Structure formats: structure tokens, C-alpha cells
Amino acid sequence: MVTASAGETVAVSREAFFRQSDIVSLHVRLKPETRGLITAEDFGQMQPHALFVNTSRSGLVAPGVLEAEIAKGQLHAAVDVFDQEPLLDRENILLTHPNVLATPHIGFVTEDEFDMQFSDIFDQINAYAAGAPIHMINSEAYH
């Protein structure tokens, strides 16, 4: 670990980060460049019985990687995001394994994120009501 000028401790590498962390909590937006961000190699670096928390998006973890790691019985996980929602497969390892705490997509948000999301939604509704929509993807369809 390295101590930066502001006093925070930063791992010297990605491998060291995963190897030295008891808990990894994922808080990243899913975008094309973050899809599959967490890999089998990352989980392979984690200590036995480390905890992985994902309340962001399941697509941030490479497909099948979390399930495979859970099946090994070494990793613990807390997740409330799944590849398919709602998760209806009652046999899915993310619902059945004792090392997993699964919640129904309710642990994803901090108070600040919640305020930002709803503020943005209200801004869009008000702009639309005023006849000047904002953040339109296909503005040509508005006319």
C-alpha cells in the first residue's frame, strides 16, 4: 500500500488491491467501458472468505464469474443486482448459496445518488411540461 498526499491509502496495483482487501464494494456506473470490469482474475486474487458487494449493476462483473467463484465456496457476496431481473430461477446459486446475501434491487443507492436521480427526473418532467424537453436521445421524434 502507498499513502498519497491527501492521506488516503492506495494499493500499488490492481492485483494488490484485490489481494489486500477484506471487502470490495462496487460503486460504478455501467457503461460500455465498465462492462465486465471485475474479472475471474480479480476474484482469484481475493483472500479466502473475503466479501464482494455489488449494488451497482451485474454487468460490471464478467458473465458467470461471480457464480463460478461462489461455487468454489471461498468468496462471500452481497448482491442486489442480477443478470436477469427479477431473478426467477430459484435454483440460481446467487439465491441458494449460504455465502451469498441477495436482496431484490433495493441496496443500490446512497442518499446523495437518490437525490441526484430524482432531481434529474423532475428537471426533465418540468422541462417537458414547459415545452422545452431536455436530455432527449431522439429529439427529431418530438416534433
Image: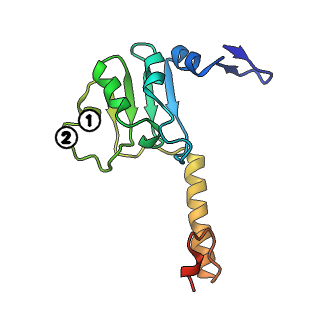
Q: Marks 1 and 2: in contact by CB < 8 Å?
A: yes
Provide residue 124's location: percent of width, then percent of height. 59, 70
Determine whether, in the image, residue 61 is placed left or right of residue 120.
left
Give the labeled residue for mark 2. Answer: 90
Q: Quadrant of residue 6?
A: top right
Which residue lies most toward the right here? Answer: 5
Give the labeled residue for mark 1. Answer: 95
Residue drawn 39% across and 15% down?
A: 49
Disc 1: CA contacts within 10 A as few (<14), some (14-19) or many (>=20): some
| Among the two numbered marks 2 and 1 on one chain, the one whose residue lies closer to the N terminus | 2
Residue drawn 25% across and 32% down?
A: 93
Determine whether, in the image, residue 143 is placed left or right of residue 69.
right
Q: Quadrant of residue 120?
A: bottom right
Provide residue 56's location: percent of width, then percent of height. 48, 42
Q: Is the residue 125 above or below the residue 51 in the image? A: below
Amino acid type of disc 1?
Leu
Amino acid type of disc 2?
Arg
Provide residue 125's location: percent of width, then percent of height. 57, 73
